[in-house]
Image (cartoon, helix red, strand yellow):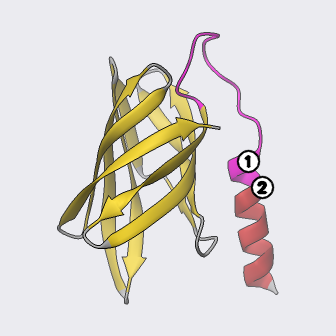
Amino acid sequence: MWRLLGILAAAAAIFAPSVSLANDDLLSGLWRVSGKVASFDFSVTCRLERHGDMLGGACLEASNGKVHPLTGGSVEGEKVTWTHEGRFLLKTFKVVYSAVLHDGAMQGELNAAGHSGAFTAAKL
């Protein structure tokens, strides 16, 4: 019961409205991120919150509802990078997204546990 309440609270925090620092901030908000790493397809919904040249927020796994708070993130021009912890088969590892924001969409590469793959992201 407590686990379910925790998941619901975390999901509510991800989907809650955030305050943008600038009216022209195209990065802050919800993003559907999809791609493939090694032989695994993935899809997450990330709430990115821009604070100057830093990013905060969290990502929610579509397949199992796990929430991953961002542990880091930065913006440099059109280059966007964010990280969170991942877990697979009792192993914890760092997940790093590196993308280029162009025309309201992102394309980039994800690195996790020694594997990498391409992803795309569209703002919801």
Three-letter amino acid code at disc 2? Ala
The residue at which mark 2 appears reads as 12
Which residue sits at x=60%, y=12%?
22
Q: Position of residue 30 (x, y in %)?
A: 63, 40
* Position of residue 80 measured from the top left corner of the image (x, y, whole percent): 36, 32
- Secondary element at tag 1: helix
The quadrant in which the N terminus is found is bottom right
Q: To which quarter of the image does residue 94 belong?
A: bottom left
Q: Which residues are magenta?
A: 12-28
Mark 2 crowd level (few <14, some 14–19, many ≥20, 10 Å Cα): few
Question: Is disc 1 surrounded by few (<14), some (14 to 19) or many (20+) residues within 10 Å?
Answer: some
Residue identifier under label 1: 15
User: Residue 28 vs residue 108: left or right?
Assistant: right
Please tell me whether residue 123 is drawn above or below residue 114 in the rendered image: above
Q: Magenta stretch containing residue 14, yes or no? A: yes
**Main SS of residues in magenta:** loop
Instruction: Tell me the SS state at disc 2.
Output: helix
